[in-house]
């Protein structure tokens, strides 16, 4: 019972962080590992929470008219292909290999967050068209999908980095982000489940926490703001990354 409470609280925290700044999985995956799950199983189990969180987020963005269908249509095929490939690869690495990869990714994301300036405000300008005629557009989303399928943790930051390079504003960019993740997560979750890498009991507790945390994040955004949360996330990510690396 204690582990379920811990995961519910962790899910609340992760959901809140994902609304405020992103990076919730950078906390939940290590916590699942510390609770005794093998690293690869923690990676698969975390997908339940991601799925639950993005169902609500995608619906809210859609009903507010912030999701751009042309961008979703252009980015989804390559992202989905990459995600399935990444998840397939993740089911075939050892726990030690995945744990090392996760630690490296966490440090990389932490460095990227530290180097990032203040996020630009959303714009009311005309929405740019996706440059789907360029091979680099599809290659970028393919790599996003591979990362998301293999690790997932920190994917929000990776997607926003790609989106910011395309000129899409962050509000619509976030709508695209959560909808893309929602679209490929059932496939990656199915691959992990087929490989026996999902703990449904722990994953359900984490998913419920993520749902609650997403709502809390809206209120905390007004109270504290993203700059404060970014500092908390960076500190926590570095601590978890060091702990993960030396625990192998």
Image (cartoon, rainbow, N blue to C red):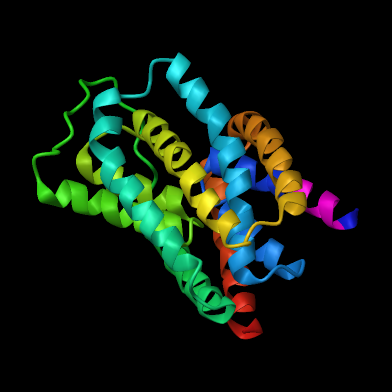
Main SS class of the magenta portion in the image: helix
Q: Percent position (x, y) of residue 209?
A: 72, 41
At 57% across and 72% down in the image, what residue appears?
A: 241
Q: Nearer the viewer, residue 68 or 87?
A: 87
Q: Percent position (x, y) of residue 23?
A: 53, 52
Magenta range: 3-9
At 44% across and 56% down in the image, what residue appears?
A: 149
Q: Is residue 78 above or below residue 124?
A: below
Q: Is residue 99 above or below residue 148?
A: below
Q: Nearer the viewer, residue 193 or 179?
A: 193
Tally of numbered discs: 0
Q: Quadrant of the C terminus?
A: bottom right
Q: Percent position (x, y) of residue 84?
A: 39, 54
On the question of residue 236 being in view, the answer is no
Q: Nearer the viewer, residue 240 or 200?
A: 200
At 14% across and 38% down in the image, what residue appears?
A: 132
On whether residue 242 falls in the magenta region, the answer is no
Which picture quadrant has residue 53?
top right
Q: Residue furthest right?
A: 1
Q: Percent position (x, y) of residue 210?
A: 66, 41
On whether residue 8 falls in the magenta region, the answer is yes
Q: Nearer the viewer, residue 19 or 116?
A: 19
Q: Locate residue 213 relative to residue 142 in the image: left or right.
A: right
On the question of residue 34 being in view, the answer is yes
At 47% across and 37% down in the image, what residue appears?
A: 182
Q: Is residue 145 above or below residue 184?
A: below
Q: Residue furthest front?
A: 194
Q: Locate residue 109 relative to residue 134 in the image: left or right.
A: right
């Amino acid at each position: 019972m204690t582990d379920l409470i811990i995961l519910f609280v962790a899910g609340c925290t992760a959901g809140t962080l994902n609304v405020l700044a992103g990076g919730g999985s950078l906390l939940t995956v290590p916590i699942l590992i510390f609770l005794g799950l093998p690293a690869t199983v923690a990676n698969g189990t975390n997908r339940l929470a991601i799925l639950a969180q993005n169902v609500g987020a995608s619906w809210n963005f859609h009903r507010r008219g912030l999701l751009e269908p042309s961008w979703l249509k252009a980015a989804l095929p390559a992202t989905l292909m990459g995600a399935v490939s990444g998840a397939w690869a993740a089911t075939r690495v050892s726990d030690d290999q995945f744990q090392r990869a996760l630690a490296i990714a966490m440090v990389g994301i932490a460095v990227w967050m530290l180097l990032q300036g203040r996020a630009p405000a959303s714009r009311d300008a005309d929405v740019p068209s996706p440059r789907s005629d360029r091979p680099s557009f599809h290659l970028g989303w393919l790599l996003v999908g591979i990362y998301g399928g293999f690790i997932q943790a920190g994917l929000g930051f990776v997607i926003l980095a790609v989106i910011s390079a395309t000129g899409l504003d962050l509000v619509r960019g976030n709508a695209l982000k959560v909808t893309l993740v929602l679209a490929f997560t059932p496939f990656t979750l199915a691959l992990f489940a087929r490989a026996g890498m999902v703990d449904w009991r722990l994953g359900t507790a984490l998913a419920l926490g993520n749902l609650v945390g997403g709502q809390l994040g809206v209120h905390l955004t007004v109270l504290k703001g993203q700059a404060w949360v970014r500092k908390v996330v960076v500190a926590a990510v570095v601590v978890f990354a060091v702990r993960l690396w030396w625990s192998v």
